[in-house]
């Protein structure tokens, strides 16, 4: 072989090696290296769950796509109600998810979440493994899910069930704030030929808020009103429903947080920090080292709203008096702070910086004017003895 041929061969080998290195490096950076190099892509999923009427026995998911197969989990207010059969990888349309035997009816505001089958046994195991297996598909760090309002079915020709009131109309405000109440006005009628007594339920996102009992004669109607306290609700689009035993109507309310999110430090020492917080979602306050970003302590879970004198222990952190610290609002679980998201307002993280020395108590020996005993002694010295 000639020297020129040998050099050409070496150049081709070097070029191939460099190309492989570049592809591998790019794959590591974006997490999408080709499968031929043994790098797996993150599992992906999408779901569409639309508002619908139902009999409480099942709901229908319009479409779900799973890259690796799995399950659709139907939940109400973070409580799992039922789980679909195993779904193979691919796209599935009109997926019916049946009510669990002896489980609650599938009505109200429900959420459908796509879960993986990490155990590869086609059996859902998320709850029984405390979330270690069959966890949700994620997109941008959040579970892939969709919400829908499921109202009771009615028969347009015969009306509601023969022994149930009808919900003829429902009125709620389009918007509200979390420091106010939501006014609910519903028209309830008796479309049967019987004297009826029955419950009327008012629910927010499927959660029972209030129940009233009505007595109506055949053909009679009555206006039902209620004031729903919004202070315990999280901001966002809330679904408000009025239900009888066989009928119901749903409306949505755009609920806004009543003030700007904020956190302020009211006291601090090396072992504990106390803050006031206005937090627009369920979350917590974290104390962090502003230089290293290390988390020094977190508060207990806080519901959306305003909180005073929230105490955060610093455990064994023992920061120096002049260390710059920060208090930050987070949305998420304080038991899993690494998965929590900092709360933003006007595109800025809601936080405040401080030092412990800024909250050090003044030395009482530096100011004797507030000592009542010393004042008494001075008054006695100034007094004139009448015997002198």
Image: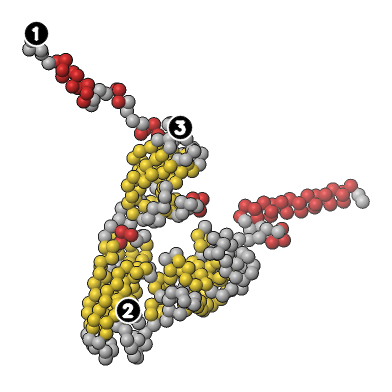
Q: Is residue 166 left or right of residue 102?
A: left
Name which residue lies at 30% across and 25% down. 364
* Mark 3–mark 2 distance (CA, rounded to whole Å): 61 Å
Q: Inspect this view and state whether residue 67 appears.
A: no
Name which residue lies at 47% across and 71% down. 81
Q: Where's the C terminus, which quadrant?
A: top left
The answer to which of marks 1 and 2 sits earlier in the sequence is 2
Say which mark, if any, is on residue 218. Answer: none
Whether tag 1 and tag 3 are in contact, CB under 8 A, the answer is no
Residue closest to the far right: 1
Q: Which residue is mark 3?
A: 320
Q: Callout 2: helix, strand or loop?
A: loop
Q: Callout 3: helix, strand or loop?
A: loop
Q: Which residue is mark 2?
A: 244
Q: Residue 62 location in percent, x, y? A: 49, 76
Q: Which residue is mark 1?
A: 388
> On the image, which quarter does residue 232 sit in?
bottom left
Mark 2, Cα crowd under 10 Å, few <14 / some 14-19 / many 20+, is many
* Mark 1–mark 2 distance (CA, rounded to whole Å): 95 Å
């Amino acid at each position: 072989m000639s020297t020129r041929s040998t050099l050409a061969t070496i150049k081709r080998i070097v070029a191939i090696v460099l190309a492989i290195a570049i592809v591998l490096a790019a794959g590591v950076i974006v997490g999408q290296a080709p499968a031929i190099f043994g790098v797996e892509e993150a599992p992906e999923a999408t779901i569409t769950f639309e508002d619908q009427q139902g009999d409480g026995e099942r709901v229908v998911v319009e479409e779900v796509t799973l890259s690796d197969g799995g399950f659709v989990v139907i939940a109400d207010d973070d409580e799992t109600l039922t789980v679909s059969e195993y779904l193979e990888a691919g796209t599935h349309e009109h997926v019916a998810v049946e009510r669990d035997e002896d489980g609650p009816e599938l009505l109200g505001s429900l959420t459908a979440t796509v879960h993986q089958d990490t155990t590869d046994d086609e059996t859902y195991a998320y709850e029984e493994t405390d979330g270690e297996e069959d966890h949700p598909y994620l997109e941008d760090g959040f579970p892939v899910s969709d919400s829908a309002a499921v109202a009771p079915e009615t028969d347009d020709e015969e009306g509601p069930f023969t022994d149930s009131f009808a919900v003829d109309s429902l009125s709620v405000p389009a918007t509200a704030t979390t420091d106010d109440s939501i006014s609910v006005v519903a028209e309830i009628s008796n479309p049967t030929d019987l004297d009826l007594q029955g419950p009327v339920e008012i629910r927010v996102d499927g959660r029972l808020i209030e129940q009233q009992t009505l007595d109506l004669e055949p053909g009679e109607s009555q206006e039902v009103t209620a004031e729903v306290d919004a202070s315990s609700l999280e901001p966002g689009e809330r679904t408000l429903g009025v239900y009888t035993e066989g009928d119901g109507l749903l409306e949505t309310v755009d609920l806004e947080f009543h003030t700007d999110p904020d956190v302020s430090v009211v006291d601090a020492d090396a072992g504990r920090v106390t803050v006031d917080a206005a937090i627009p979602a369920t979350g917590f306050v974290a104390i962090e080292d502003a230089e290293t970003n290390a988390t020094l302590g977190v508060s207990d879970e806080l519901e959306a709203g305003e909180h005073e004198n929230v105490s955060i222990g610093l455990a064994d952190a023992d920061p120096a008096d002049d260390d710059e610290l920060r208090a930050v609002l987070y949305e998420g679980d304080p038991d899993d702070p690494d998965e929590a998201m900092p709360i933003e307002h006007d595109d800025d993280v809601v936080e405040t910086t401080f030092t412990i020395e800024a909250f050090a108590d003044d030395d009482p020996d530096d100011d004797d004017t507030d000592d009542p005993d010393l004042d008494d002694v001075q008054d006695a010295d100034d007094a004139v003895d009448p015997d002198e």
